[in-house]
């Protein structure tokens, strides 16, 4: 698969799972998701993930298609980006720091992206032809 479409698939999937996060939270709290709550939750996590993911090589083809590199690079990068996103959220949207939200947000977004990336790598590795000796 060409590297540009593969990167686009990975980043689109990453953004989709980050966009799902406020809806998962709303379901658990039985609250509707407003445009304001969606924006102040998703925007900082998306910005932080794009910056840290790029710096950590989480968007290169080798990382996208390797379960081992996902474990080493993506997992560390998404946790780091989650911490940065919590800080960005406070700065950009004047939100007070909540330990409970920070823990839930970082853990949930980490799991969502980690599971998505592992699923993508698994599909990509199944599509590759097996070499015969």
Image: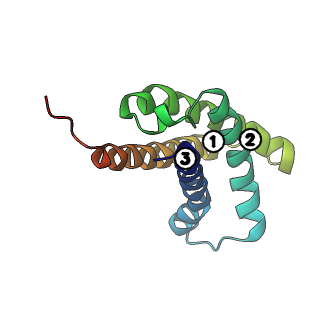
Q: Which residue is mark 2?
A: 97
From the image, state whether disc 3 or disc 2 is nearer to you.
Answer: 3
- Percent x, y of residue 100: 60, 44
Residue 22 placement: quadrant:
bottom right
Q: How packed is label 2: few (under 14 Cα within 10 Å), some, or many (20 or more)?
A: few
Q: Which residue is mark 1?
A: 102
Cα separation, mark 1 vs mark 3, equals: 11 Å
Q: Describe the element under mark 2 as helix, strand or loop.
A: loop
Q: Nearer the viewer, residue 68 or 106?
A: 68
**Label total for image:** 3
User: Residue sitting at 63 percent across and 38 percent down?
Assistant: 82
Q: Describe the element under mark 1 as helix, strand or loop.
A: helix
User: Residue sitting at 71 percent across and 36 percent down?
Assistant: 51
Picture quarter with the C terminus: top left
Q: Describe the element under mark 3 as helix, strand or loop.
A: helix
- Percent x, y of residue 50: 68, 41
Q: Which residue is mark 3?
A: 109
Q: Are marks 3 and 2 in contact (CB under 8 Å)?
A: no
Q: Are marks 1 and 3 in contact (CB under 8 Å)?
A: no
């Amino acid at each position: 698969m060409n590297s540009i479409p593969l990167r686009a698939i990975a980043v689109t999937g990453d953004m989709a799972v980050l966009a799902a996060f406020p809806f998962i939270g709303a379901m658990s709290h039985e609250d509707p998701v407003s445009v304001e709550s969606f924006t102040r939750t998703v925007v900082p996590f998306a910005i932080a993930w794009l910056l840290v993911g790029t710096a950590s090589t989480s968007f290169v083809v080798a990382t996208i298609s390797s379960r081992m590199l996902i474990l080493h690079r993506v997992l560390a990068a998404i946790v780091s980006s989650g911490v940065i996103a919590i800080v960005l959220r406070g700065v950009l949207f004047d939100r007070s720091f909540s330990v409970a939200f920070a823990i839930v947000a970082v853990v949930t977004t980490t799991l969502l992206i980690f599971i998505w990336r592992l699923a993508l790598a698994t599909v990509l590795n199944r599509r590759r032809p097996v070499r015969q000796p």
